[in-house]
Image (cartoon, rainbow, N blue to C red):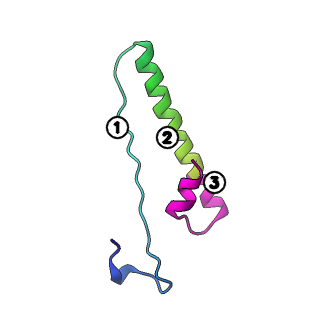
Amino acid sequence: MANVSKLHQAGNANLLHRIALRGRLKGTKKETKSFNAYLENLQAQVCEAHHQLSETSSIITAESFRSKF
Protein backbone atom coordinates (compact mmCIF):
# COMPACT_ATOMS: atom_id res chain seq x y z
CA MET A 1 0.00 0.00 0.00
CA ALA A 2 1.28 3.45 -0.88
CA ASN A 3 2.24 5.89 1.83
CA VAL A 4 -0.60 8.44 1.79
CA SER A 5 1.81 11.35 2.30
CA LYS A 6 3.60 10.35 -0.93
CA LEU A 7 0.46 10.45 -3.11
CA HIS A 8 0.28 13.04 -5.84
CA GLN A 9 -2.72 15.37 -6.11
CA ALA A 10 -4.31 13.09 -8.72
CA GLY A 11 -4.12 10.17 -6.30
CA ASN A 12 -1.18 8.54 -8.07
CA ALA A 13 1.96 7.33 -6.35
CA ASN A 14 5.42 6.49 -7.60
CA LEU A 15 6.10 2.81 -8.08
CA LEU A 16 9.45 1.06 -8.00
CA HIS A 17 9.68 -2.25 -9.80
CA ARG A 18 12.39 -4.83 -9.59
CA ILE A 19 12.64 -8.07 -11.44
CA ALA A 20 15.39 -10.28 -10.09
CA LEU A 21 16.67 -13.14 -12.18
CA ARG A 22 18.86 -15.04 -9.78
CA GLY A 23 17.98 -18.47 -11.04
CA ARG A 24 20.94 -19.03 -13.33
CA LEU A 25 22.14 -22.59 -13.36
CA LYS A 26 25.73 -23.73 -13.38
CA GLY A 27 26.90 -26.49 -15.65
CA THR A 28 27.54 -27.42 -19.23
CA LYS A 29 24.58 -29.65 -20.06
CA LYS A 30 22.35 -28.66 -22.97
CA GLU A 31 19.33 -28.15 -20.69
CA THR A 32 21.33 -25.85 -18.40
CA LYS A 33 22.53 -23.71 -21.28
CA SER A 34 19.03 -23.60 -22.74
CA PHE A 35 17.51 -22.47 -19.42
CA ASN A 36 20.15 -19.76 -18.93
CA ALA A 37 19.57 -18.53 -22.48
CA TYR A 38 15.83 -18.38 -21.75
CA LEU A 39 16.48 -16.24 -18.65
CA GLU A 40 18.76 -13.90 -20.58
CA ASN A 41 16.14 -13.56 -23.31
CA LEU A 42 13.43 -12.84 -20.75
CA GLN A 43 15.59 -10.18 -19.10
CA ALA A 44 16.22 -8.56 -22.50
CA GLN A 45 12.47 -8.52 -23.23
CA VAL A 46 11.74 -6.83 -19.90
CA CYS A 47 14.42 -4.19 -20.52
CA GLU A 48 13.13 -3.57 -24.05
CA ALA A 49 9.52 -3.23 -22.84
CA HIS A 50 10.61 -0.73 -20.19
CA HIS A 51 12.63 1.21 -22.76
CA GLN A 52 9.68 1.38 -25.20
CA LEU A 53 7.28 2.51 -22.49
CA SER A 54 9.75 5.12 -21.26
CA GLU A 55 9.96 6.61 -24.75
CA THR A 56 6.24 6.66 -25.43
CA SER A 57 4.71 7.62 -22.07
CA SER A 58 5.58 9.83 -19.19
CA ILE A 59 3.87 7.46 -16.75
CA ILE A 60 4.43 3.71 -16.79
CA THR A 61 1.71 1.72 -15.07
CA ALA A 62 1.64 -1.93 -14.11
CA GLU A 63 -1.10 -2.43 -16.69
CA SER A 64 0.90 -0.84 -19.52
CA PHE A 65 3.95 -2.90 -18.60
CA ARG A 66 1.88 -6.10 -18.39
CA SER A 67 0.32 -5.42 -21.80
CA LYS A 68 3.78 -5.71 -23.40
CA PHE A 69 3.77 -9.41 -22.52
Q: Which residue is mark 1?
A: 22
Q: CA distance from mark 3 to mark 2?
A: 14 Å
Q: Which residue is mark 3?
A: 52
Q: In which image quadrant can residue 15 be found?
A: bottom left
Q: Quadrant of the N terminus?
A: bottom left
Residue 11's spot in the image, x, y percent? Answer: 46, 82
Q: Residue at x 49, y 27 (%)?
A: 37
Crowd tier of the residue under label 1, counting other residues whose Cα lies within 10 Å: few below 14, some 14–19, many 20 or above: few
Circles 1, 3 touching at the beta carbon (< 8 Å)? no
In this rendering, the answer to whether 4 lies above or below 25 is: below
- Which residue is farthest top? 29
Instruction: Indicate the amino acid at tag 2.
Output: Gln
Which range is magenta?
50-69
Q: Residue at x 54, y 47 (%)?
A: 47
Q: CA distance from mark 1 to mark 3?
A: 24 Å
Q: Residue at x 58, y 50 (%)?
A: 49
Q: Which residue is mark 2?
A: 43
Crowd tier of the residue under label 3, counting other residues whose Cα lies within 10 Å: few below 14, some 14–19, many 20 or above: few
Q: Determine whether the residue tagged by mark 3 lies in a helix, strand or loop.
A: helix
Is 68 colored magenta in this rendering?
Answer: yes
Mark 3 or 2 closer to N-term? Answer: 2
Q: In which image quadrant can residue 24 be found?
A: top left
| Circle on res. 39 | none
Q: CA distance from mark 2 to mark 1?
A: 11 Å
Circles 3, 2 touching at the beta carbon (< 8 Å)? no
Mark 2 or 1 closer to N-term? Answer: 1
Residue 60's spot in the image, x, y percent? Answer: 55, 64
Crowd tier of the residue under label 2, counting other residues whose Cα lies within 10 Å: few below 14, some 14–19, many 20 or above: some
- Which residue is farthest bottom? 9
Instruction: Indicate the amino acid at tag 1.
Output: Arg
